[in-house]
Image (spheres, grey):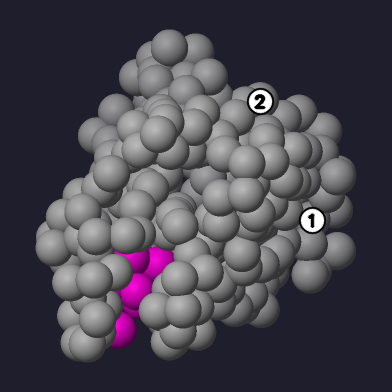
Amino acid sequence: MKGSRIALTRPVESSAPWSDAIRRAGGCPLQFPLVEIHLLPTAALLPDRAFLMIFTSVNAIRALMQNVSLVNKIRHIPVVTVGSASSALAKMAGFSTVHEAETKRADGVFAWIEKRFGRGNGEQIVYPRGNLADGELASRLTALGYQVVSPILYETKPVSSEALLTEARRGRVDVVSFASGSAVASFATGWQTERLRGWLENRLKFLSIGPKTSEVMRAHDLRVDEQARAPDSASVIAALQRLLHKNT
């Protein structure tokens, strides 16, 4: 990976683990966020007698941390998270019981709940999420017998891809990485009308964080050259190494 220039398209505030890992592996991380996260005011209406809380993103926790009095009211509720970053931030926020799902995707949370508790009987689960999160996890938990409360605590908004495409035209980008379907959609807006698209397609490589992001990439006619096996820094580095090794 030595010297390879890797464009990171996730928000800057969540890119640090990837950036650090890429530097340690000898690569050069480039910050080109294609989405912005806007935290919303948190209402004091989150149930304080919920059976469980789910965090699949650090952004939902960051939004809650804006309201210290609210966090103090709900910190006793057990939490299950996707990934170590969400787990660490939930503990930092003061939640007393934090579990991390074994599989670092939303379906890992479902599997954890099903294995640990089985079918529900109307118990309430709070699942704070963003405006673009799909409803699959909530639907599956509802079908399993739980009552799911899912407030929207942050919004994801697109950022122009022009800065990234400009550097790519100058030959200063080797790999473009995508951590979400929303970043893919933002990139595709500029990519579809890119005058040097044919040339760029031959020299750029594209990395996906997982199957859902890959699905969105293909829907936008964007090639998936490699896919990380899990959405964590170690898996991303391994995927980058596989990708770059293909071309040596």
Image quarter (top left, top right, bottom left or bottom right) of the C terminus: top left
Q: Amino acid at mark 2?
A: His
Residue closest to the far front: 248
Image quarter (top left, top right, bottom left or bottom right) of the N terminus: top right
Answer with mark 1 or mark 2, whichever residue precedes in sequence: 1
Residue 241 seen anywhere in this rendered image of the structure: yes
Count of marks placed on residues: 2
Badge 2 marks a residue whose secondary structure is strand
110 lies above or below 206: above
User: Can you tell which mark lies on residue 71?
Assistant: 1
x and y percentages locating residue 103 in the rendered image: 47, 23
User: Can you tell which mark lies on residue 82?
Assistant: none
x and y percentages locating residue 25 in the rendered image: 67, 36
Which is nearer the eye, 138 or 35?
35
Answer with the quarter of the image where residue 174 lies: bottom left
Residue at 43 percent of width and 38 percent of height: 244
Numbered range of the magenta stretch = 182-190
Left or right: 236, with 143 as reference point? right
Badge 1 marks a residue whose secondary structure is helix
Q: Amino acid at mark 1?
A: Val
Residue at 22 percent of width and 87 percent of height: 195
Residue at 65 percent of width and 54 percent of height: 28
108 lies above or below 133: above
Pointer 2: what residue?
99
Left or right: 212, with 241 as reference point? left
How far is disc 1 from disc 2 in space, using C-alphas? 17 Å
x and y percentages locating residue 83 in the rendered image: 60, 35
Residue 77 seen anywhere in this rendered image of the structure: no
